[in-house]
Amino acid sequence: MNSFDTIVARATPAGKGAIAVVRVSGPTAFDCTDALLKNKISLKKSHTALLRQFFDANGMIDEALVVLFKGPKSYTGEDTVEISVHGSDYIVNRLIAALLLNGCRVAEPGEFTQRAFLNGKLDLAQAEAVADIIAAEHRFAHDQALKQLRGGFSGDIDALRDRLLHFTSLIELELDFGEEDVEFASREELTSLVTNIKHKVDALKDSFALGNALKQGFTLVLAGRPNAGKSTLFNSLLNEDKAIVSDIAGTTRDAIEDRLFIEGLSLRLIDTAGIREATDVIEQQGIARTFKHIEMSGATLYLFEIGTISPAELESDLLELISKTDRIWVVANKMDSFLGDIAPYTAVVERITQLEMWQISANDRLSVVGLTKQLAFRFQQDLGILDDQTVVTNARHANSLLHCSQELQHILDGIRNALTGDLLSFHLRSAISALSAITGHIDNEEVLGNIFSKFCIGK
Ligand SMILES: Nc1nc2c(ncn2[C@@H]2O[C@H](COP(=O)(O)OP(=O)(O)OP(=O)(O)O)[C@@H](O)[C@H]2O)c(=O)[nH]1
Ligand SMILES: [Mg+2]
């Protein structure tokens, strides 16, 4: 890539629309634009919007609004022009062709953001957040991307990195003194610093499994014996008559899924075939699929019809499920027709899952609304998605954190085994460079190219 080129691309999606925006960035952005205008813009003030008529050799292209940003006060850090034309593919293509004739070239995917990074307007994690914020389809993904874009995540990483850098410099100072056997960096302090940092790095690394699941859409599976009311609850949560409900056990034979939004989270809700000894081959296959979904789920909502199964049967169902998945949330259904004692059931659930048993009537709207609230609360409490908490949602970041954590472990082991200062310093530097890779204090062209190629053109 030659960062001295002036690049051009459409910044809005293809197709008809009220307007379409064409972006031009680079040293000749104003000249290229002026070449199509009678009334020049290059001498106008930065950050102004101007109405202009654009012409090529064949006549007028369009009347458009031009916003100019003089570098470095622009998204890319370079001179930039954003031209809002009428949203027609024909106009956009003709305008871009005219700009190309005047010396621009077509931008590569993500090249505007890549320039913003190279010009120090954004660090790498922030640049990646631009792609995430565009892709965000629900509040959780949006919140995390926004936090990352505004530099919150980078700030956390840089703070950890700075503390490690400080110690590295002390250790390296020791090395300079060679034989004199001085210890500037107390090994005790180093142990407690590294332990502390490793704790934070591990917490961030571990948040990825959940962060990724939540970003992609967390899978919530409805499972239980036939007739428990799974399809009734499925329909009620979705507010739609999607699954067939009947009092015939074994009604649902194949998994059905839909997307459910709860409190800003996007969930894949899956209704499954009831689990029992199958009566035919098709049902058998359906039940095998149920188990597959349970194994892959973010959480399984186990539903049972209270009164028709005993606490002992509930216990054996839960023990079987808990061997297949980490998260089982238990719901007692048909509370409207139960008059018995609930305590033996709640005792079993609390003992096995360490969580409260929810009680509902799936055919009662209010009861299901209550369940939705409890689900939202459990997402917040049990999954630790608190508003101010940083959750890692990017696989590249998770990988770097893992690498950093391993290096920190080497340091802790090393201190215990009286490893020499130069080896400690080697691992410290590796740990630091793993953290640096997240925010982009790296100069590896290949890594950068790979990150920005995932963007769409015009970003
Ligand atoms: N009284 C009462 N009946 C319910 C409740 N929820 C579901 N039912 C009834 O229970 C029966 C079975 O409901 P379904 O939703 O089809 O049960 P399912 O778990 O999907 O059953 P399978 O698909 O066969 O595994 C239907 O007749 C429902 O109307 C409830 O809260 N109270
Ligand atoms: Mg069903």
Image (tube, grey):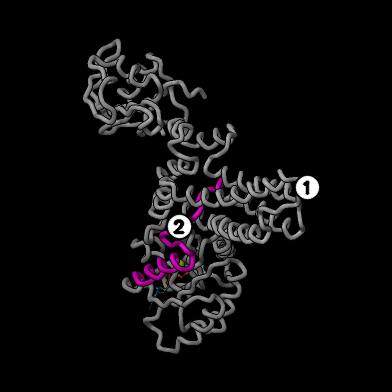
Q: Is residue 110 visible?
A: no
Mark 1 or 2: in front is 1
Q: Residue at x 25, y 23 (%)?
A: 44
- Using residue 147 as the reference point, say whether residue 210 is left or right of it: right
Q: Amino acid at mark 1?
A: Glu
Q: Secondary structure at mark 1?
A: helix
Q: Are marks 1 and 2 in contact (CB under 8 Å)?
A: no
Count of picture labels: 2
Q: Residue tagged by mark 1?
A: 179
Distance of label 1 from label 2 (alpha carbons): 63 Å
Q: Say if the magenta span includes residue 396.
A: yes
Judge whether 373 appears above or below 266 on screen: below
Viewer-side residue, 355 vs 219? 355
Q: Quadrant of residue 191?
A: bottom right
Residue furthest to the top in view is 57
Q: Residue at x 36, y 70 (%)?
A: 368
Q: Position of residue 153 (x, y in %)?
A: 47, 50
Q: Say if the magenta span includes residue 303.
A: no
Q: Position of residue 47 (x, y in %)?
A: 28, 31
Q: Is residue 146 visible?
A: yes
Viewer-side residue, 113 vs 236? 113
- The residue carrying pointer 1 sits among few (fewer than 14), some (14 to 19) or many (20 or more) residues within 10 Å by Cα, namely few
Q: Amino acid at mark 2?
A: Arg
- Please provide the residue range marked out in magenta: 368-397
Q: Position of residue 269 (x, y in %)?
A: 45, 60
Q: Quadrant of ligand 2?
A: bottom left
Q: Residue tagged by mark 2?
A: 268
Q: Position of residue 352 (x, y in %)?
A: 56, 77
Viewer-side residue, 143 vs 433? 433
Q: Secondary structure at mark 2?
A: strand
Q: Residue at x 40, y 43 (%)?
A: 134
